[in-house]
Image (spheres, rainbow, N blue to C red):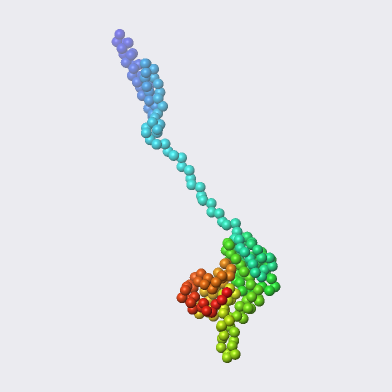
Amino acid sequence: MKKNILYFIVVLILSSALVSFAGCGSDEAVIELDGERFLQDPPTDIDRGQPECAAIVPDEPMEITEPDGVTVYVCGAVNSPGVYTLDPGLRIVDAVSAACGLREDADECYVNLATLLEDGQRIYIPTREETAESRGELITVGTDGSSDRDGGKVNINLADAAELMTLPGIGEAKASLIIEYRNQNGRFGTIEDIMKISGIKEGMFNRIKDRICI
């Protein structure tokens, strides 16, 4: 009888040791039900009430698209006036070449051919006759040797930088802005439009309005 009891105790101790060894280092739980043992899977993050980790998706780099080209309108004394689309970074001389070059009567010194093109720009090339008329109207020498400006006003649509600089308050910088405005926007519609030039306000306009024309 004592041997049976001792045997039962040894078996119980060994069984307990085996169960402890099987569960060591694992989150699996052992459940005993009606004398049968079942292994339970370890709890997940959701079971523990912890949120699942969201997958991290790296941001895709933004693609910077460069303009396909600049579209300009070339008109005046060129062989093939029209609208042309050219590569960015080109200059007025390239636009003139696209328009099959200057005509024989073009005044190639009137426009700065080295100016960079801008999208939507209007490029007008005058003839030598047009610019000569502008110069002729600038100053007419009277019989008394004085300058007669009654009919010799500065045509702000045709005058070059030197002619524009004869106006009071118009220096080299403002003359360049006037010519650049004409190259990009075409002719002035009224003499008041000259106030669209940076630095030319009503006060300066009142000083030159009687000496300019379009």
| Place of residue 69 in the rendered image (x, y in percent of width and height, measured from the top left) | 60, 59
Q: Is residue 188 left or right of residue 36?
A: right
- Does 15 appear above or below 188? above
Residue at the (60%, 71%) spot, across then down: 112
- Does 130 appear above or below 52? below
Extreme-top residue of the structure: 1
Q: Tell me if residue 210 can be seen.
A: yes
- Does 135 appear above or below 95? below
| Place of residue 61 in the rendered image (x, y in percent of width and height, measured from the top left) | 51, 50
| Place of residue 147 in the rendered image (x, y in percent of width and height, measured from the top left) | 56, 86
Residue at the (60%, 80%) spot, across then down: 137
Quadrant into which the C terminus falls = bottom right
| Place of residue 21 in the rendered image (x, y in percent of width and height, measured from the top left) | 38, 25
Residue at the (40%, 21%) spot, across then down: 38
Q: Nearer the viewer, residue 23 or 158?
A: 158
Extreme-left residue of the structure: 2
Quadrant into which the N terminus falls = top left
Q: Nearer the viewer, residue 88 or 197?
A: 197
